[in-house]
Amino acid sequence: MFLGTHTPRLDDKGRVILPAKFREGLAEGVVITKGQERCLYVFPEAEFARIAENLQQAPMSSKTARAYTRVFFASAHDEVPDKQGRVTIPQRLRDYAGLDRDLVVIGASNRVEIWNAPTWDEYLEASEEAFADIEEGDLPEGL
């Protein structure tokens, strides 16, 4: 499980050093793809394969499933982190997420998310009230 908030920097070659506490879970390989709200999702390969299998179960007649699947897979980039825990983020994904030097990398349970730092700050500020207003029944049972 990935937890916490980290603030690495993007280097001149478009690489980010993954937080040390995430490296073991990502060492075998990652898949980086577009996420919602203009962030990037970074999945361990096994988790990406599990999600891919679930998406393959969606009927091809579902317009929503087709659209999501196209974007999710077409933007995916697989890579194995180097010995320093660095991964290269392709330019098209950096452009999508508006990534520049200052990043925020968060643990989001089964995935890691990479955000442009100001975008993350704006998202967090805008979502604080909604987070505080979540009521029973809005989340899975038991939460």
Image: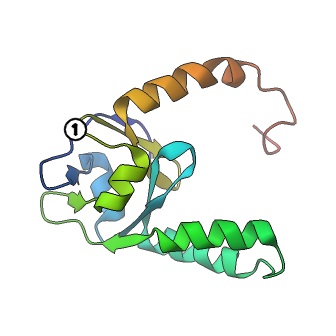
Q: Secondary structure at mark 1?
A: loop
| Residue at 33 percent of width and 52 percent of height | 22
What is the image's colouring? rainbow
Residue 51 visible within the image: no
| Residue at 56 percent of width and 43 percent of height | 37
The answer to whether 71 appears left or right of 57 in the picture is left
| Residue at 44 percent of width and 44 percent of height | 107
The residue type indicated by label 1 comes to Arg
- Report x, y in % for residue 57: 75, 81
Q: Give above or below for 104 relative to 128.
A: below
Residue in front for this viewpoint, 6 or 123: 123
Residue named by callout 1? 101
Residue in front for this viewpoint, 74 or 113: 74
Which quadrant of the figure has residue 9?
top left
- Report x, y in % for residue 8: 23, 39
- Report x, y in % for residue 55: 68, 74
Residue 71 visible within the image: yes
